[in-house]
Image (cartoon, coloured by chain):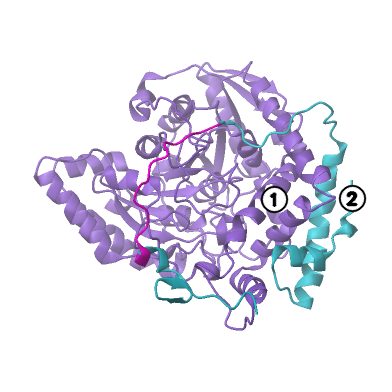
Chain colours: A cyan, B purple
Amino acid sequence: MAAPSDLNIDRIAELSRLALTAEEKVRFSAQLGSVLGHIEQLSKVDVTGIEPTAHAFPLHNIWAADIARPGLAVADALRNAPAQRENMIVVPKVME
Amino acid sequence: MTAPLHFQSIAELSEHLAARRISSVELTQAVIARTKAVESRVHAFNSFDEPDALAQAAASDSRRAGGQSCGALDGIPIGLKDVIAVSGQPLTASSKMLANFVSPYNATVTESLQGAGAVLHGRLNCDEFAMGSSTENSAFGPAHNPWDLTRTPGGSSGGSAAALAAGAAIATLGSDTGGSIRQPAALCGLVGLKPTYGLISRFGLIAYASSLDQIGPFARTVEDAAIVLGAIAGHDPRDSTSFKTEIPDYRAELKRRRGPWKLGIPEEYFGAGLDPEVGAAVEKAIAFYKAQGCEIREVSLPHTHYCLDAYYVIATAEASSNLARYDGIRYGHRSREAKDVLDVYQKSRAEGFGDEVKRRIILGTYVLSSGYYDAYYLRAQKVRTLIRQDFLNAYREVDALITPTSPLPAFKLGEKSADPLAMYLCDIYTIGVNLAGLPALSLPCGFTAGGLPIGLQLIGQPFREADLLATAHAYEQAHDWHTKFASL
């Protein structure tokens, strides 16, 4: 199993879409280092032949009838948007 | 001596309402008056809407006057943890990210309580996005324990526990991902129930770790917990993990199911780290059951030692995925400093999330990242299988398990907030239940010499809440811990 020192905080912050300050990077690395040190214990468990559990009571193929139902009204859907105009959410330019 | 209205149980108050000794408006006014009297010290609420609550109470009184009462919850003020959607009300998850968010729809549990006539009173404080064990991760400041205001009420549903223990609600709902109902119930001297995964719809609950999250009640008595559970349990097509199972009349079953039960004592839950006063109170409770004719057996849950590690891999992995939706685009906080789209994501999240949420997103992203997935996430899921198997093996011998809920009584605010690992260890006895998807409850079983409540955890079998509640009820009937209230 990987050593805790493998936690590349810059890479993980980028994947997480979190702009961390230099101070946060140092602090979170240290704190998560000790948590990961604890988690390393999982490597001691013999899991040969054991199936993973994603849900305690797995339900499969939950189907719903393909029928249109009323959803949120436009005003309700946009109520919490940070910026909106003409029934659309305004975002910064994606492409030049 | 009769307790003031705000400290009475649902069972008592529903009788007063039915007999017209009080109206729901009078009861709601009493609870709101109490809320205002204690809130500056307890900080259990993120917000409450007095005119809205009184309008609901007036509607309840009208129903009753017209002979259309909906039952035991009709007219009873119930508070909701601020991660459960109520249409038109704020929904913040105690995060700056959602500081201005207003729910556009109701959670299914909200509709269930409204259908039962409950008066929804307040949005209750919690750790940010339900991540924590002390409510200190709330962006709006911690809640305080009514039994000792310098101490935590626990978390993450600390506001739900503190409000009820302070008399600012008659019952509350919380959510429990790793112990977030049971631990605060223990620390505040209340009954707190985490139902079987799939019994209660999660539709309209802000997601933290979807395979572990479950909504459940806080109540003053086991009977009250049974009443609230009966109102919110049941299949919901809007939650694809909701289970189709028969819902018994939990309240009526309390009287029908009388034991004696075979009760298991898992040795791994009584080791180092357990506060001696907590251990002694739990031992006394075990002795009570034995004296009632229950068979007490020692059992082993050999993978208990790995619960915390499996939990912090699985829960953070799911959280990193669930919280990806808070990107500053469609709703939630958007940074004013952002120049392009990537900037919107990164700065909005940096500004909107607090430290613990960031830590868990980072940890979850790491354990899911390329090259580490098998070593951490997949392995944790396999260990989860073994943990669940431990419980199912124990249930071949016993009906339920008895353990302490929390290794410690309420700790001082600030005592553990700088050390995430020390905080995580608070959940050591509650986490396995979530990984295995089992029902479990905490109920009061004594006080420390310093006057802090102690909680007993009973862990039951899947979808057998009726038996679990009856087992707890038998203890409660013979003790008076639930009749003691915090003096504020």
What residue is at 52 percent from the left and 33 percent from the top?
B196
Using residue B411 as the reference point, say whether residue B57 is left or right of it: left
Residue B271 visible to an observer of this rendering: no
Separation of disc 1 and disc 2 at Cα?
Answer: 17 Å
> Is A43 colored magenta in this rendering?
no
The quadrant holding residue A35 is: bottom right
Q: Residue furthest left?
A: B66
Does residue B460 appear anywhere in the picture?
yes
Q: Which is more toward the observer, B308 or B454?
A: B308
Give the number of the disc on residue A2.
2
Question: Which residue in the structure is indicated by mark 1?
Answer: B317
Count of labels shown?
2
Q: Which residues are magenta?
A: A61-75
- Tell me the subunit letter for badge 2: A
Left or right of residue B152: residue B298: right
Q: Position of residue B192 (x, y in %)?
A: 48, 42
Mark 2: secondary structure: loop
Q: Which residue occupies 31% across, 65% down? A: B49
Picture coordinates of residue A27 (x, y %)?
78, 69
The amino acid beneath tag 2 is: Ala
User: Where does the C terminus of chain A fall, quadrant-wise?
Assistant: bottom right
- Is B433 or B441 nearer to us in this picture? B433
Compared with residue B265, is residue B90 higher up or lower down, i.e. above or below?
A: below
